[in-house]
Image (spheres, rainbow, N blue to C red):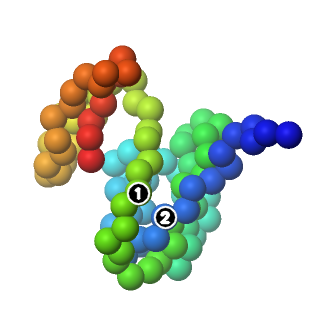
Amino acid sequence: MSVERISAVTLKVANMQASVQFYRDLLGMGVIYGGEDGFFSSLRTKDGKDPILNFEQSRATAQWGRIIFYVPQVDALWRFLKEKGFQPEIPQDGSWGERYRPI
């Protein structure tokens, strides 16, 4: 027996409203449960095939974590985020053959 796919990832967030707005309004994910005023919210990419991204309202944490999203044009996403007032690191080429934007 083996794991077939990842169904969901859950992250603790200190600001549910800002988290939902970022992933929904800037990255185009759809809210499928909860929302800006919820204690627990779930989002998914528009095609509905990817794992669900859950947010649980919590205190800020200093622990480390990572989510990797695929986008067809990393440099275009970088420019988009810059235009929206974010200061993302400059995309770079990884030794494994992909272009990525470190966070």
Q: Residue at x 57, y 49 (%)?
A: 44
Name the residue that disc number 2 marks. 11
Nearer to us in this view, 57 or 34 = 57
Callout 2: SS: strand
Q: Residue at x 34, y 48 (%)?
A: 26
Is residue 38 visible from the viewing direction of this image? no
Return the disc, 2 or 1, that comes first in the chain's sequence. 2
Is residue 10 visible from the viewing direction of this image? yes
Callout 1: SS: loop
Q: Residue at x 53, y 51 (%)?
A: 30
For the residues marked 2 and 1, what is the alpha-carbon distance in whole angstroms? Answer: 9 Å
Q: Position of residue 57 (x, y in %)?
A: 47, 77
Q: Quadrant of residue 17?
A: bottom left
Give neighbour class at mark 2: few <14, some 14-19, many 20+ (Cα, 10 Å). Answer: some
Q: Position of residue 43 (x, y in %)?
A: 55, 55
Label at residue 2: none
Q: Residue at x 44, y 32 (%)?
A: 70
Q: Quadrant of residue 98?
A: top left
Q: Looking at the figure, which quarter contains the N terminus?
A: top right
Q: Is residue 35 above or below residue 3?
A: below
Q: Position of residue 14 (x, y in %)?
A: 36, 76
Kind of residue at disc 1: Gly
Q: Position of residue 55 (x, y in %)?
A: 50, 66
Name the residue that disc number 1 marks. 65
> In the image, which is nearer the foreground, mark 2 or mark 1?
1
Q: Is residue 44 above or below residue 77?
A: below
Kind of residue at disc 2: Leu
Pointer 2 with pointer 1, Cβ within 8 A: yes
